[in-house]
């Protein structure tokens, strides 16, 4: 307890000197360096899932499955078959570097590449999928892009140096182990050995009875949706599958793009949009690329309702997730990990001077392994001013809004910091509603008089202290998202030890 108190006091001291002596910023950066946590996060287990941070890889070699043209700063163009070195997973992308000493690096969609080993002489064969797991192989082969007899070869999960052949048989996948002899020959049956894996595959594509299904063609991996023709797309290219939820500004649906790519579609009313600013604002949003921000794929704005098409996060929004059985099994360490990811995404927006205006659990989306991303950033800027104000009947989320924004429509990064404090409250209360029992007007009046939400029973003092820092009456005294990220990482590291 003393250790965590000292840690939090240190953070408050840092903020004091940064606010009142900004001219010595370089000195403060030297004393309190900004960046990743000193102790890398480790796997966290819960009852329902193995929730762990994205791993940092030791530069494995990947092959590009398709051509990919960078759509903006921060992405990397690659050609089909090109070998790249992957530095790190970043959500739905990999941070990759060109081979050959050029040092050029950038983001490439994960579905555009596959892991290979340059020690495998068949690493560039179309049927070789490297370190693809058994479950991932089944997901790929059972997708709509593949059919009866589609197959792939992958490195064995249980036997280092071994391989497996996965074959689609109607609506299931069969797996066959490929054995190796000390002389490096390959075999599925003891009686039939092959000098190379390529020879083995060629033989069994003709003599397939052992597998019970013909090996028809190599597995096809789904591409990540790209938008080379501009962000405005025809609405008929999208089909709605199921409604995921409804927020202040419209409905959210799971959909398909060209009957192939799974996407999320937010539907907005044209009457609510600032038509004169729409194109400019969308162009600004498309330039924002970060692993903790939801990726925008396309827009359909020529008829009602307007579609904003983004990547699909499998576990939905954070508020619903916190109410789910899996969400209710989270411990404080998981909650801090979630908050740290949100702070990371918001720190990027802070750096770009982008104001979110609607930061809340409902606008954080969740994927497998507890990966969280900020959604709807900048959306409020697309709405007409009379739609997004604190007036009666308006759609402003008053209980998440800083007093200067609710009373005077003064929005800034610091008003987002206030909302982040409310988001922390939502997280530690498993999706509890702030200011329960108060109307919007009552909550605003109480806040103006100095009232702040009390510390929830499920919260630790260090996290509640961060909440209160976010709710400082003076905007300039509220922390930056960068400092919040650093403090949350420190709390995370302490909790996990």
Image (cartoon, grey):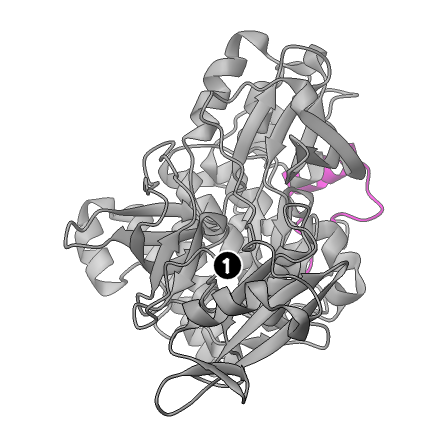
Residue drawn at (58%, 50%) of the image: 421
Q: Work out whether residue 283 or residue 83 is closer to the camera in this orientation and state it.
A: 83
The residue lying furthest to the bottom in this view is 182
Drawn side of residue 107 relative to residue 246, left or right: left
Residue drawn at (53%, 77%) of the image: 495
Mark 1 crowd level (few <14, some 14–19, many ≥20, 10 Å Cα): many
Magenta span of residues: 434-454
Residue that numbered label 1 is attached to: 340
Q: Residue 279: x percent and y percent? A: 50, 14
Q: Is residue 248 visible?
A: no
Q: Examine the rendered structure and indicate whether residue 316 appears above or below residue 160.
A: above
Residue 459 among magenta residues:
no
**Element assignment for label 1:** helix
Q: Is residue 382 visible?
A: yes
**Which quarter of the figure has residue 375?**
top right
Number of marks in the image?
A: 1
Q: Residue 487: x percent and y percent? A: 43, 63
Residue 439 among magenta residues:
yes
Q: Work out whether residue 266 or residue 158 is closer to the camera in this orientation and state it.
A: 158
């Amino acid at each position: 307890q003393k250790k965590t108190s000292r840690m939090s006091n240190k953070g408050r001291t840092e903020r004091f000197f940064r606010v009142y002596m900004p001219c010595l910023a370089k000195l403060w950066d030297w004393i309190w360096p900004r960046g990743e946590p000193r102790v890398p996060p480790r796997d966290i287990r819960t009852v329902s899932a193995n929730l762990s941070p994205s791993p940092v890889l030791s530069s494995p070699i990947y092959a590009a499955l398709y051509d990919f043209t960078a759509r903006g700063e921060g992405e990397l163009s690659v050609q089909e078959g090109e070998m790249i070195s992957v530095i790190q997973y970043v959500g739905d992308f990999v941070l990759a570097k060109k081979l050959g000493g050029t040092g050029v690096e950038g983001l490439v969609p994960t579905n555009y590449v596959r892991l290979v080993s340059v020690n495998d002489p068949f690493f560039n064969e179309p049927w070789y999928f490297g370190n693809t797991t058994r479950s991932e192989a089944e997901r790929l082969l059972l997708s709509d892009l593949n059919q009866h007899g589609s197959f792939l070869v992958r490195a064995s999960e249980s036997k280092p140096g071994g391989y497996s052949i996965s074959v689609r048989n109607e609506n299931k996948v069969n797996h066959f182990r490929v054995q190796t002899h000390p002389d490096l020959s390959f075999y599925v049956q003891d009686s039939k050995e092959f000098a190379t894996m390529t020879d083995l595959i060629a033989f069994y594509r003709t003599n397939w009875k052992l597998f019970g299904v013909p090996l028809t063609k190599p597995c096809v991996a789904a591409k990540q949706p790209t938008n080379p023709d501009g962000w405005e797309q025809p609405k008929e290219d999208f089909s709605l599958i199921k409604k995921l939820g409804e927020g202040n500004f419209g409905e959210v649906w799971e959909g398909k793009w060209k009957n192939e790519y799974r996407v999320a579609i937010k539907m907005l009313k044209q009457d609510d949009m600032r038509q004169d600013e729409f194109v400019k604002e969308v162009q600004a949003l498309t330039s924002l690329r970060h692993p903790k921000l939801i990726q925008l794929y396309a827009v359909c704005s020529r008829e009602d309702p307007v579609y904003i098409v983004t990547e699909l996060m499998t576990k939905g929004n954070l508020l619903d997730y916190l109410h789910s059985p899996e969400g209710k099994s989270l411990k404080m360490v998981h909650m801090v990990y979630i908050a740290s990811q949100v702070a990371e995404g918001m720190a990027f927006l802070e750096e770009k001077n982008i104001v979110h205006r609607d930061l809340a659990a409902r606008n954080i989306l969740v994927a497998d392994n507890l990966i969280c991303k900020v959604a709807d950033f900048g959306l409020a800027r697309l709405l007409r001013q009379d739609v997004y104000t604190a007036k009666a009947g308006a759609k402003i989320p008053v209980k998440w809004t800083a007093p200067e924004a609710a009373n005077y429509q003064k929005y800034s990064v610091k008003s987002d910091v206030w909302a982040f404090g409310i988001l922390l409250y939502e997280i530690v209360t498993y999706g509890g509603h702030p200011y329960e029992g108060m109307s919007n007007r009552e909550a605003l009046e109480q806040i103006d008089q100095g009232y702040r939400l009390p510390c929830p029973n499920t919260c630790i003092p260090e996290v509640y202290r961060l909440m209160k820092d976010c709710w400082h009456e003076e905007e300039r005294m509220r922390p930056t998202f960068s400092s919040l990220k650093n403090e949350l990482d420190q709390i995370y590291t302490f909790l996990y030890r």
